[in-house]
Amino acid sequence: MSRYFYYHVIYVGLINIMLFVPWTLVHYRFNGAVSGMAIAAVAGTFLAYLTTSLYLRFPGMSLPDIVNSYLPRGFAVFLNLIGASLWVVAGILVIYSYSSTIQQFFNPDMNPYLFLLLMTAAGVWGASRSTRSVQFAQEIMLLISAPLIIMILFKAIFSPWLDWDAIRVTAGYVRTPPSFISFCAATFVFAGYNTLAVFNRLLPPGTQIRHRWIIPLVCSFFLLVSFFVPIGFHGTVGVAEYLYIWSVTADSMIMEYGFVYRVLYVFLLLYTALSLMFAMNTWHTAMEFIKACHPRHKPKPDQFPVSPANWWINLAFAGLTFGYALWTNEQRNQWVNQNWLIARTFSDVLAAVILGWLAVKAARRKRSPIPSEAASQDS
Amino acid sequence: MRRARIFFSGFALLLIFSISGCGFKDIDKRFFVVAMGIDRGSAPSSYRVTVRLAIPTGNMESGETKTEVETMEAPSIAEAVRQLKSIVDKELDFGHCRVILFGRTLMEDGVDDPINWLSRRRDIQQVAFLGMAEPDAFHVLKLHPQSERYPGNALFLSFGSEGTESSYTLTEYLFDWVRRQSETGKDGFLPIIRTDKDRNSYRVDRVAFTDKEKLRLCLDPEESQLFNISARRYDKAAIAMPYQGTRIVFALSQVITRVSITRDDVPTVTFHIRASGFLEESPPNFMEGDIPKIESRLQAEVNNRLVDLLNKIRGAEVDPYGFGLHYLATYFGNTKDWEHWKKVYPEVVFRVQSRIVIEKVGLVE
Amino acid sequence: MIEEIRSDFIDATDLFTDILDNGFWAIEIAYFPSLCDERIKDGVLVPFSYRFDPDEFRRMLHSNPKYENADNPKEWANLLLKGYVLLKIEGKHYSFKSDRTPVTQIDIAQVESTLQGPQAAFTEDLNINMFLLRLRYNVPSLTVEPFDKGTLSRTALFVVYDHRLVNPNILKSLHKQLDKVKLDLLQSSGQMIKQLTEKSRRLFPTILETERPDRVASMLSKGKIAILINGSRFALLLPVRLFDFMHAMDDEYESFWMSRLLSIVRYFAVVLTITLPALYIAIVSYNPEIFRVQIAFTIDGSRAGVPYPSFIEVFIMLFMIEALIEASIRLPRIVGSTATTVGGLILGQAAQQAGLVSTIMIIVTSVVAISNFVIPNVSFSQSVRLMKYLFIVIAMIYGVSGVAVLFFALIVYLCNLRSFGEPYFALFTSRSKEKSNKEKG
């Protein structure tokens, strides 16, 4: 069952492109991006190991369940709302930036809100499903799209037009002191483990997550590729001129014998799947956080048909997306993106700390004669 | 309840259909631009934009395609394209524009504005072929070769590697050229395309070098081929030289190059090139014992020619090989190293170490 | 007895009632000759008439399993309608089972034909179907639960499963669903499917209909439940997954690589038949730059004479092909071939030459139609047929990206479906049965 965990790791590693992670890193390429990435790789791996181990100590419980059952109610609700807002924003950012990418490259004449409507509708539809359905859909979408995406990545790496000199020059700036924002951006690539916050409910008790060395290996690969390949294609200087770095990079490749000539279109279609998956997951997680605020909440990971509350919560998220789209522009969007990346890093550390504290608390409680085990089994 | 639902869905459907239509434009209402040329206009600081439009026909047989060439002059490219739209009956679509040509006079003046326009337009592919047209883009685009199977196909094929694979033809994509325009220590090159009036075809056998602003140097076909071999490791080429009264032609099958640069005050650039291949034409009484001799003769020949070429390029103060970038990459240089390199580049010493391996002697002894 | 029955069936002139008197006894008899077969002669008339012996006759009444006591007058009408003969002998009431089974021959599979597999198919008779099933899956643990459904038709049905393998939760929920069945006439398995599905407006079938006993047998061995309905050629199987609908029985009989190749072809065909018309619209009207230059020019050239937008063209062609399919189902077999020939000619040549549709569109239409028939299951193939219209609508509004988004939504929809609590579309869930047992049980 732990394979579902790795699906999350992989798609979160791949989606970084839509959250302006390469853009942020490229911006700081001469001022500490590379060193920030190096530190992030270590920190991200450490956090991933730590957090997953902590979740496994609470079998079958999501983060809201854990918080609800060990902390006073007011504090638990507060934490859940923080979690929900962070997750919602992630989905909103990806949906917004993806629909504006698509609008740029596919349908330049279309009203941007019209495409946003389609994306949010698909996001609401996906996220309002039950947790188990979300997991199934995710597996299928990932197995369809990931091989092709990884093929494109390898095509880029082995392209004769990739300038290794430019990559080497940029890599030389590892000696500059790391910049904080690029550290935060780079840790995002490793953040796939966070989805255990809800999907831990579906891991049957006694599951072990084996082969955890996959996380540093795969995520570092994604991080390096998403930063260095655009530099290799657009030069150390030219790369900073593009906003949608990866779309332009994908457009720099051709498939001479393919049905589709320009890699860009394949890339964008595959990222449709990934972005929607990400939105589905984040909104679903946020929805579960919000539902857990209700005093008589009982987690139902395999509910069919789903409760109307799912719909209403997700429709509210969709409304927020439209609000965001109305308010934002390119500068504001990048500002929000960067601050979200920073906030996310802090919340990750916070989550690990809280989990660690509660794990200690739970272990103590277990030793004491009060049978608290029953309560946690119920939820 | 039920009636409300039907009403609601009907309303939603109506809404959707009324929104539809933005961007909806059938393929037969579009004019595909297959190639585009930008020249200097007759008035100062104006541009002349030429587009070659495809007119598809039901059945496509060789030479039956129809294309239309439209040209327009305006103070800026965007305006020229706008005005072009007014003289054609369908919407211009740049989605399939795979060749972009700059006229020679424009290149001599600098191409900042066109590049700016090209990278702003989302519908222009980053993998469009770039070239410099001689004497100007309009005349090249007006040519209509007999062999064209679908509109513009001859032009695409002569640049790309799907069709003819000529060692004289360099391929340059838009994204590569744009990056070379801004990259530190690497300058752009463009293949030169000319019309061959009597044979009714294109001729792409020379290469032009630009610095960050404008055209600096054009090579002749032989030098272009050598540049293609050494810079792009193009291995479907041949090196010819006179030998004992006849001419031998060495056809390459694999080229490996490596550049090493010393970190002296005036750096020495050593260009290692290892080429293996076979003799396509060899002396009639060719003996096996001659192979090492031929190899060393070929090596000397390559060394001389390449050093000449490198010196010529350095003399024009361009760096299409990217030695500067490689220098920075080797020593993880920063701005200071770059300043140093810029200062000493006109004096750097080039050395070429070639290694020629003759694998087979063709099919006959 | 006769008066009571007559008062129930006032206008039923085909009811036969009489008092038979052989000199020793007089018995009352009532039955529907149309519902009963010749067994009356051997079971009732011969022993009663010229071979009559009161002791032997009494013994026969008690020992022959076809005779049963029928002392409850409320059941009489029901028994008569089921093909029983009612008798009143020495003041006691008996029923004699003599229902006529119209079809006795085993049919060959028509809807799900195979090349080299077994050719037998279910018939419309429950007992023969049970025989066909027992022929292939005959183990002591095979459980058969009889039910009667339909307030008017009182159709008999069997719920069949292997009690060692079946998931008790699913069985429980099936019983719950069966209790909820509200039907007047149960005449076909399709009605039963609608009744058993929790939400009847599903886009995809979650219960498999099959006419092949070998498929039922192989599904039973996987722990699934079969429902056989009297008077229906089709058995129902549940719970099923999407892959079961895409699985032809040939896959189990062909060689390994061939069957893998064929199933890949089948899935590819499904994707094609769903998305191709939509992609045509998207490519023609929104994003002609996606495919290679040649394709764009070919489409452009062939569309040159078409006077209306791409989606109208698509609707015209799809309407024609749907009409053709409908016509060839309804038409008698002899005329059917004429219809297809005429239709094919019109679709193939004339429409294109008249400039109504483009050549590419004709290819698209035929690919869509052919791909649709590759799907082994009829109801699934119909669902897929419907899906393509959704894709066409989205392509009209959003182009290629809309198609991609809708494809995602479709996959989510399929993953969201449950067939009796079991996931409908999920990969590698061989262990899910144990898991759901643990969770719920």
Image (cartoon, coloured by chain):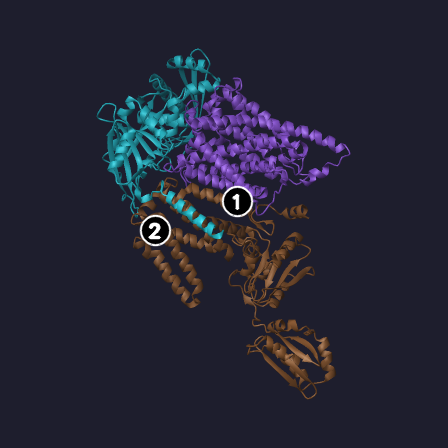
Residue mark closest to the camera, 2 vs 1:
1
Task: Report the chain shown in purple.
Answer: A
- Contact flag, marks 2 and 1 (Cβ < 8 Å): no
| Horizontal side of residue A242 vs C411, given as left or right | left
Q: Amino acid at mark 1?
A: Val
Task: Report the chain shown in brown.
Answer: C
Q: Colour of chain B?
A: cyan
Label for residue C412? 1
What residue is drawn where x is 39% and y is 40%? Answer: C290
| Quadrant location, the C terminus of chain B | top left
Q: Is residue A161 or residue C78 the one in the foreground?
A: C78
Task: State the image coordinates of residue A337 (x, y, percent, origin top left).
Answer: 49, 28
> In which quadrant of the rendered view does residue C150 lie?
bottom right
Q: Residues within 10 Å of mark 1 (few under 14, many from 20)?
A: many
Which residue matches tag 2?
Answer: C359
Q: Are marks 2 and 1 on the same chain?
A: yes
Label for residue A76? none
